[in-house]
Structures are given as structure tokens and as C-alpha cells.
Image (cartoon, grey):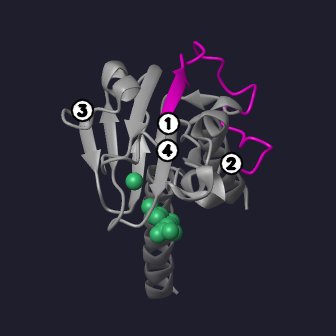
Amino acid sequence: MERMNMVVALVVLLGLVGPSTGAVYKVGDSAGWTIMGNVNYGSWASNKKFHAGDVAMFIYNKNFHNVLEVSKADYQSCNAASPIATYATGNDSVLLKTAGPHYFLCGIPGHCASGQKVEINVQKASSAAPSMAPVEAPAPDSGAESSSATATATPAPTPNTNGAASTGFSVCVGIMLLLASLCF
Ligand SMILES: *[C@@H]1O[C@H](CO)[C@@H](O)[C@H](O)[C@H]1NC(C)=O
Ligand SMILES: [Cu+2]
């Protein structure tokens, strides 16, 4: 049915052009956010290209750790006393909203000093190269877990309005059939 093809085409088009949802990076990969095993968060971050809109996901035991976003100075000195933001649920998805460096450390005494800190440098958004390149293609190296995030990005409004239109169409056909049955 022609109408159906158009709806499908429209949805696909909106999916391609629509706002891109960022990738989700699990900090420390399988190790998570910890002081066990001497995870090198510097090298974890260094082979990734973070963009504004990406998410850094901190997974940890909330009884032993937390996540503080801090200034550069506080990052360097492991000062946990004046955080910009505090996260403590054990599963914190931190949206990297702005370009530039973001500094995170664990505020439990001694943890930052023993390496539980990470600097995430968020790239400037490349000024609108729409549709051509898959801007948010997940990195080949397993770090990105963007599939679930992308799945939720499917725009809802279009199917709804089209659904309403076709409902109206069916009602019209129904009324016409009703009138026809009265006449014959
Ligand atoms: C963390 O939360 C996300 C949803 O935000 C969920 O998909 C994931 O399974 C959670 N992970 C853990 C280890 O709890
Ligand atoms: Cu800690």
C-alpha cells in the first residue's frame, strides 16, 4: 500500500536526519570504577573520542566509592572537598554536555591518590556534517555501548499523526459503506 511505504520512508528519513544520541562509554570497561587491579584510567580515556552528548557510565560499589566531578586544580591535587557535581548511586550515567576537559575522581580518602581519577576530554562538535557520515558509529574497540541509546531515539510523533490520518480514512470508508448499504 502506497501510504504505508510513505510512512516507512518518512520514519527512516527522520531516523537518519534526527538528533544523534551520544555513545555510552563504561568507565574502566569491564573493571568499572575501582581501585582494584590498578586500572589505568588515563589510557582508558586516551584511545577514545568523546563528543558532547556522549555519556560516561560509572559502575561501582556505592559502599566503597563515589564519583565527583571537580576542577582541574582539584583533580591534580585530589581535593574532594569542593566538587562541581557528586554522584553516588553506583551506576551513574554522566552526560558529557560541553566540549573541553571534564575531571572526575573518587572522593573516598586515598582512592584518587591511588589512581581512581579520570580526565575525559570532550571534542568540539564538528559543525554540522548532516546525514553523510554516521556521526555516532560506535568505536570498534568495544568501549561504546550505544545500541540501547540509539534504539530509544526513534522519533515517535510521525507514526502517531499518520495513524490518526489513516483512522480518519477508515472512518470515512465506514460511513460511505454505511450510506451505500442504506441506499441499496
Ligand atoms: C546501569 O544502568 C543502566 C541504565 O541506565 C542499565 O542498562 C545497566 O544494566 C546498569 N548496570 C548495572 C551494572 O547496574
Ligand atoms: Cu573509590
Distance CA(mark 3)–CA(mark 1)? 15 Å
Residue under pointer 3:
84
Report the magenta residues as a range: 118-142
**Residue found 73% across the figure and 62% down from its top:** 1
- Which mark sits nearer the N-terminus, 1 or 4? 4
- Which mark sits nearer the N-terminus, 2 or 4? 4
Give the residue type that dot 1 points to: Val
Q: x, y (%) of residue 34?
A: 50, 56
Q: Nearer the viewer, mark 4 or mark 3?
A: 3
Is there a contact, CB below 8 Å, between mark 1 and mark 4? no
Picture disc at residue 143: 2
Q: Nearer the viewer, mark 1 or mark 2?
A: 1
Relative to 141, say whether 66 is above or below: below
Give the structural element (helix, strand or loop) at label 2: loop
**Closest to the observer: 30 or 109?**
109
Q: x, y (%) of residue 18?
A: 55, 37
**Closest to the observer: 22 or 111?**
111
Relative to 5, say whether 14 is above or below: above
Picture disc at residue 118: 1
Give the residue type that dot 3 points to: Ile
Relative to 13, say whether 119 is above or below: above
Distance CA(mark 4)–CA(mark 3)? 16 Å
- Which mark sits nearer the N-terminus, 1 or 2? 1
Does 128 appear in magenta? Answer: yes
Q: x, y (%) of residue 150?
A: 59, 51
Residue under pointer 4:
56
72 to the left or right of 174: left
- Which mark sits nearer the N-terminus, 3 or 1? 3
Is there a contact, CB below 8 Å, between mark 2 and mark 4? no
Is there a contact, CB below 8 Å, between mark 2 and mark 3? no
Q: Nearer the viewer, mark 1 or mark 4?
A: 1
